[in-house]
Amino acid sequence: MEYLYIKSLHLIFVVTWFAGLFYMPRLFIYHIEASERPKNEAEILTEQFKLMSRRLWNIITWPSAILASLFAVWLLLLQPGWLQSPWMHIKLAFVVLLFAYHIKTHFIFKQFQQDIIKWTSNQMRLWNEGATLILFAVVFLAITKTATNWLFGMGGLIGLALLLMLGIKIYKNYRIKKGEQ
């Protein structure tokens, strides 16, 4: 029974971690677009987005990342045999990639808090899809518990990435036609 409770807590904090990772770049996009507005409006909006970002990052995203990781370690202590499975090796590689994504997002967050904006809204939209790709990989590995057909899986991820980029491009063209920035 302990295993099921720990697994449930792990999954809850994975969900909230990803929620933060999905929404943070969206706040960055709003921040970028707000900074391009008239000065009075830009100041009010960017301060609000900085506050929202701080709360999301420090109250939800970071604690969720830490708790998801602690419960993951606990699960591995309860099921040490998983560390012998090839699918787990690949999953853990994606988890390392997820932490790299999280840390890079943290650096971007710090820059935005100081009003240092080096990204365009389109670049940030692409960045936002990184967490989506990692999520797909980790969920499929955790559910299927197989590392076979790895090339097929990578092809699927690349196809998903291409579809996401196409969707971003179509949305950008739609916004241009409607006269939005």
Image: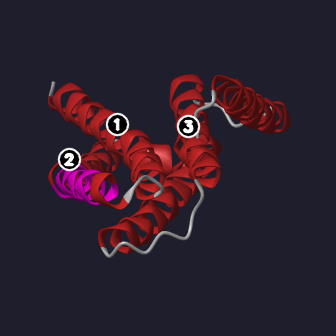
Name which of mark 2 and mark 1 comes first in the sequence. Answer: 1
Above or below residue 36? Residue 3 is: above
Residue 176 falls in image quadrant: top right
Can you identify the residue that label 1 sits on? 19
Q: Do the residues labelled 2 and 1 touch (CB within 8 Å)?
A: yes
Q: Is mark 1 on a helix, strand or loop?
A: helix
Q: Residue at left 59%, top 47%?
A: 130
Q: In which quarter of the image is the N terminus?
A: top left
Q: Give the range drawn in magenta.
A: 42-58
Upstream in sequence: badge 3 or badge 1 = 1
Between 93 and 1, the one lying in front of the other is 93
Image quadrant occupied by the C terminus: top right
Whichever of labels 2 and 3 marks the residue nearer the N terminus, that label is: 2
Q: What residue type is labelled 1?
A: Ala
- Mark 2 belongs to which amino acid? Ile
Q: Nearer the viewer, residue 60 or 181?
A: 181
Say whether residue 56 is magenta: yes
Magenta stretch, main secondary structure class:
helix
Which label is found at residue 60? 2
